[in-house]
Amino acid sequence: MGLFDVFKNRAKHSQKSPKIDYSITDNVLSVGDFTGEYHQSPKGKFILAWKDQKENGKYILLEKGKIKLQAKMRHPNNGMVSNPGVFILSDLTSKGMYGVFHIINSYGETLIKQRCRANMGPTGISDDGRFAVCQALESTSKSDSCKLFFFDIKNRKLLWKKVPETVGTELSWAKSYRFDTKKKILYLIHGKNRAYRYTFEGTFLDSKLYRHDCISVGNDIEFLEALKELKVELSENTDPREYDALIAPLKNRLKRFSDKDSKSKIHRVLGEILYLQGNNAGAIEHFETALKLNPKVGVKRTLDKLKKTA
C-alpha cells in the first residue's frame, strides 16, 4: 500500500507519526513511493512537498522528519511553508482557465481558499505565516487577469488585489517576494536582483527607482515605456538634480537602437534634461540631432528659443 492510498481528497493530520526516511536530491524530495518538489521553512522545522500527477496530485507536510499532514490535491504547485507550519499551494485546475490558491495550517485547516479566474503564477508567504501573495497570470477575466492578491492570513481575508506597476506591457512577473512584517513592506523581486517596495496597503513606493532600472537595465520595451513617462515628468518637474543619474544610461541606449524614431526620442529627453540643468549648449546639440532624425519629434520651438538666447 502506498503512502497516500488510505486518504481521500481531504487533509489528514497525523498526531503520532514516527520519523521517516526521506532523501533530497537537487529540488526533489523522495519518501516511500512519493517523489515531488519541496520547500523547507526558513528555520528548517517544516518541509512541504508536492507532486502534480494527472488530476491526482498529492502533498505532504513534514515536521522534524515526521509526517504532520498529507492529502490529495488535483494539481498542486508553487508550494511554500512558513516557520509556524502555515503553508501555501496553488491548485492549477484543468477545467477552464482558473486556479485556486490555498492557505492551510499545519493541522490541515484551510485558512483561505481563493478562487481566481486565471492561471496562477509566483506566490509567497511571510516567514511568520501571517501574510501571503499570489500572482494571477493573464486571462480573459477583467477582475482577476494579471492581478497580485495580498492576504492577511491571521484575519483570514484578502486585503487587496491590483495589477503591479512593475508588470509592464510585456507581463514581467516578479520571480519571488519578501515580507518585512515590522515595517509592513512587501518586496517584489524581479530579474537581475531588482527589488521594488509596496506597502501592506498596496501603495507602490519605488516608481522612480523602477523607471531608472527600466532605463538602465530594462529590455527595449521597458525602456521605451519609461522614456515616455520621463518625457511627461520633465514637463512638470523643475528639479534638475533628480536626472543626473539618467544621462549616462540614456546615452548608452543610443547605441542599442538603430531606428530613427527611438533615437530621436532619446535625444529629445537628453536635451530636455540638459536644458533643465542649464546646459543650453548641450541641449541645443541633442535637440538638433533629434530634429534631423525626426522632424516631428516636437522640439523645434524650444530649439529656436534656445538659439535666440545663445
Image (spheres, grey):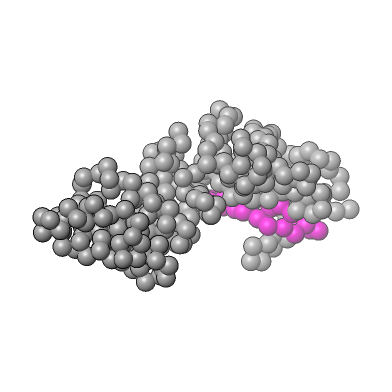
Q: Nearer the viewer, residue 189 or 35?
A: 189
Q: How many marks?
A: 0
From the image, which quarter does the C terminus lie in? bottom left
Q: Is residue 287 left or right of residue 24?
A: left
Residue 160 at what x, y percent from top left? Answer: 53, 33
In the image, what residue occupies the spot 38% across and 51% down? 228
Residue 182 at what x, y percent from top left? Answer: 40, 38
- The quarter holding residue 88 reads top right
Q: Nearer the viewer, residue 218 or 31?
A: 218
Residue 160's place in the image compared with 26, above or below, is above
Q: Is residue 295 left or right of residue 122?
A: left
Residue 48: say if magenta: yes
Residue 71 at what x, y percent from top left? Answer: 77, 44
The residue sitting at the left extreme is 309
Residue 173's place in the image compared with 85, above or below, is below
Q: Is residue 7 left or right of residue 240?
A: right
In the image, what residue occupies the spot 59% across and 50% down? 122
Residue 167 at what x, y percent from top left? Answer: 50, 49
Residue 207 visible in the current orientation: yes
Magenta-drawn segment: 31-51
Residue 50: say if magenta: yes
Residue 40's place in the image compared with 247, above or below, is above
- The quarter holding residue 183 reads top left
Q: Main secondary structure of the magenta part?
A: strand
In the image, what residue occupies the spot 22% across and 52% down? 302
Q: Nearer the viewer, residue 85 or 178?
A: 178
